[in-house]
Amino acid sequence: MRSTIYFLFISLLFLSACISEDINSSAESTKSGSYATMLTISNYLYVVNKTQITTFDISIPNSPVELNKQEVGFDIESLYHHAGLLLIGSANNMYIYKIGTNGIPTRESATEYNQAFGTEVCTSDPIVVKENLAYVTLSSFTEVCRGFARINQLRVFDIQDFKAPKLLTTIDMTSPKGLGIGKTHLFVCDKVDGLVMFNLDNPSKPIKVKTISGFEGFDLIVNGNLLVVVAKDKLLQYDISDEINIKYLSKIDL
């Protein structure tokens, strides 16, 4: 029963955080975990599975209507909203879709992560966005990646021209997972290192400034001055009103 309660708590936390009031709102107003697979934007619900994105009209909440379903690619893992764009992360690509006036998204670009390697690479990749920059973590520190080339990196893309994103920066990490953006810092969960903080004074070139270890970080939500980290066996809360000196608040064992 205790495990069920905490599972529901996490689910409600993440699902309630996946709401944006307006299609053209910025990512900063869309409080969602970077591994979210559904988002409510205005009167539309967007849901991704392993290969597709589906659009629902939820203007009548108790009678949702499926408007559109389209193939995206393989191994879809995450969905993120920024200023009228949907960024979809898969094992091999970052897809960018533009939401039309009818609520239906149209593909604008597909950026392959593995072109430089010339071989098949096993990764997972949540995405967050600040202004015209997309921050992506690529992680292949898993058993299912045996036999594949491995990448464990934080990458920064310029998406000002969302039809042709440009890779700006690559930073090697241990096993990066979910991530989120504060006022002046990027927070990245890491399966091995816990929580890693990057200074964003130069947003296109994040600088690692702090690591908080002792747990396996999976995903996080930045909500104002509160940072909630989902670890393997606990929820951790931090006060980030002063992002240079964040303060541990509490934990909930799962």
Image: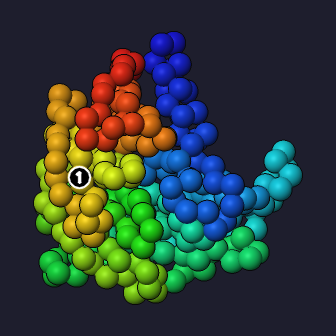
Q: Position of residue 32 (x, y in %)?
A: 51, 48
Residue drawn at point x = 41 percent, y = 59 percent: 128
* Residue, disc 1: 198
In the image, what residue type sits under mark 1? Phe
Judged from the image, the secondary structure of the residue bearing numbered disc 1 is strand
How many numbered circles are shown? 1
> Which residue is located at x 72 percent, y 59 percent?
42
Q: Is 147 situated above or below 96?
A: above
Label 1 crowd bin: few (<14), some (14–19), many (20+), radius 10 Å: some
Q: Quadrant of residue 193?
A: top left
> Which residue is outermost to the top?
1
Viewer-nearest residue: 64 or 205: 205
Quadrant of the rendered image containing residue 138: bottom left
| Depth order, front residue of 81/64 | 81
| Residue 123 image position (x, y, % from top left) | 26, 61
Image location of residue 220, percent across then percent down: 39, 41
